Image (spheres, rainbow, N blue to C red):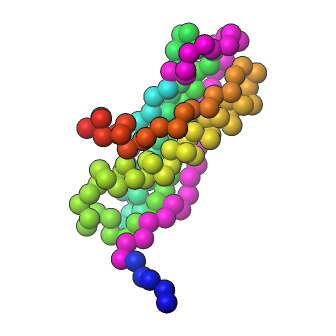
Amino acid sequence: KAIRRQRQMCIRDSKISHLKFDVINNKMPIDKPPFSFTSVMRKKSKDLIVIDLIAKIKSDDYPISLCLDLNGEFYLKNWESLNINREIEITLVQILFPYLRAAITNITALTDTTTITLPIVNVANLLQRED
């Protein structure tokens, strides 16, 4: 017997919409990458939400500079009626963040400098600290 859910969420699409990559020097980094990211949630239609994750790795002491904008499109029926926009945004960023980590690793693996593998982080804790 199938169980029917009232609310259903699914990812419909994800893509890298912007990428800027520069090699500053070829020295190997000693410290962890100077990584930061922001998220922006916007309405596309009644049941579609777009999340933009903008990631930056930039420092004068780091061998590369990278700026990447990853867009995820999600379906969530009548999401505005839930009145929990911040919780929805946190959940959607948690879903999309592993794709961002993988994109950064794959892009930097193709370079002649160093491969960057970002650590696994609790995205919900990071975003809730920003509030």
Q: Residue at x 35, y 55 (%)?
A: 88
The boundaries of the magenta stretch are 6-34
Reply above or below: 128 against 11.
Answer: above
- Of 106 and 73, nearer the camera is 106
Q: Position of residue 40 (x, y in %)?
A: 38, 43
* Residue 43 seen in the current view: yes
- Does the segment drawn in magenta span residue 22? yes
Q: Is residue 17 visible?
A: no
Task: Residue 130: name its quadrant.
Answer: top left
Q: Residue at x 47, y 37 (%)?
A: 121
- The answer to whether 111 appears left or right of 15 in the picture is right
Q: What is the number of callouts on the image? A: 0
On the rendered structure, is 59 left or right of 102? left
Q: Please state the horizontal and vertical placement of residue 30, each as a whole percent of the image.
A: 60, 13
Viewport quadrant of the C terminus: top left
From the viewer's side, name the closer residue of 68 and 27. 27
Residue 122: image location, x then y, percent:
43, 40
Q: Residue furthest left?
A: 83
User: Image point 69% across, 22% down: which residue?
Assistant: 114
Q: Is residue 25 above or below residue 122?
A: above
Depth check: give the residue in front, 10 or 117: 117
Horizontal arrangement in the rendering, residue 112 relative to residue 29 (left or right): right
The answer to which quarter of the image holds residue 21 is top right
Name which residue lies at 54% across and 29% down: 67
Query: Could you say where residue 22 lies in the image, as x and y percent from the top left?
Result: 63, 21
Question: Which residue lies most toward the bottom here?
Answer: 1
